[in-house]
Amino acid sequence: MSYDDPRLVAVYDFDNPDGPDHDFFRDMATHSGATRITDLGCGTGLLTVTLCGPGREVTGIDPSSAMLEQARTRQGGDRVRWIQGTSEQITSNNADMVVMSGNVAMHILGAQWHTALSDIARGLRPGGLLAFESRNPEARAWEKWQQEASWRETPAGILRESLRTDPPGEDGVVVMHSTYEFDDGCGTNEVQRLQFRSHERIVEDLAMAGLDVTATYRDWNRAPFTGGADQPLMVFVATRCEGLSRD
């Protein structure tokens, strides 16, 4: 979906409401005592604004201007520092906690993934937390991501949409071909890429960046992830190594 199309941004919010995933990140922020929180890939800020509280400094970072415009006008948006950009904008050695929700991690492809993890590690204080989710490739979720053209009502109008998905290559990247058309005849064709990574690879990538995995869950209720096709979700919690050097 084009995150620079205001109408599709409104549809994104409609399709991704507050839920148990947001509860997980909020609970982690509370229980860890985090006061400086960065939401990387914050989108429209639905989660971000709810991370605010007394004594907290919350930053939302996203590359989409349309997403951030929606975020700024959201109730509570004036309590967040909004930044248009990527992980490069994370302030060094500042955050108690960095979150990536809504499968943001899967949208970061190839070498950019390693750069993002390094940026996050740089941005966390020693012992600071990173929390995010990714889909388990063993579950082969892309096989279910096919949709014939159909119409539905959305806050932005009647929308006709279809989806065709190409299976992943050796790099684990799934290509999604989507068509969106509103009832006024305006629409767009979009191509999205998501990178599926195994549990082992993600743990290794985090370690290379100076981040130690302390837990991996298979659901938002914190049941331990043990692997297998019947566990499609992987929720990672990692801490920044105490001895990580700084540039």
Image: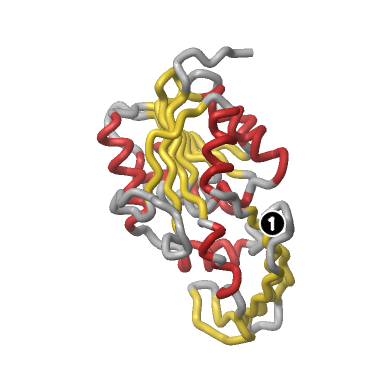
For the point 61% across and 78% down, the residue is 146
For the point 63% across and 85% down, the residue is 148
Q: Is residue 40 above or below residue 70?
A: above
Q: Nearer the viewer, residue 153 or 33?
A: 33
Left or right of 204? Residue 129 is left
Q: Position of residue 163 (x, y in %)?
A: 65, 76
Q: How many marks?
A: 1
Q: Position of residue 71 (x, y in %)?
A: 49, 49
Residue holding disc 1? 173
For the point 45% across and 16% down, the residue is 242
Left or right of 22? Residue 115 is right
Left or right of 122? Residue 49 is left
For the point 53% across and 64% down, the residue is 12
Q: Is residue 221 above or below residue 34?
A: below
- The colour style of the image is secondary structure
Element at badge 1? strand
Q: Residues within 10 Å of mark 1 (few under 14, many from 20)?
A: many
The quarter of the picture where residue 126 lies is: top left
Q: Position of residue 15 (x, y in %)?
A: 47, 67
Image quarter (top left, top right, bottom left or bottom right) of the C terminus: top right
Q: Nearer the viewer, residue 161 or 221?
A: 221
Give the amino acid at mark 1.
Val
The quarter of the picture where residue 1 lies is: bottom right
Q: Position of residue 195 (x, y in %)?
A: 64, 53
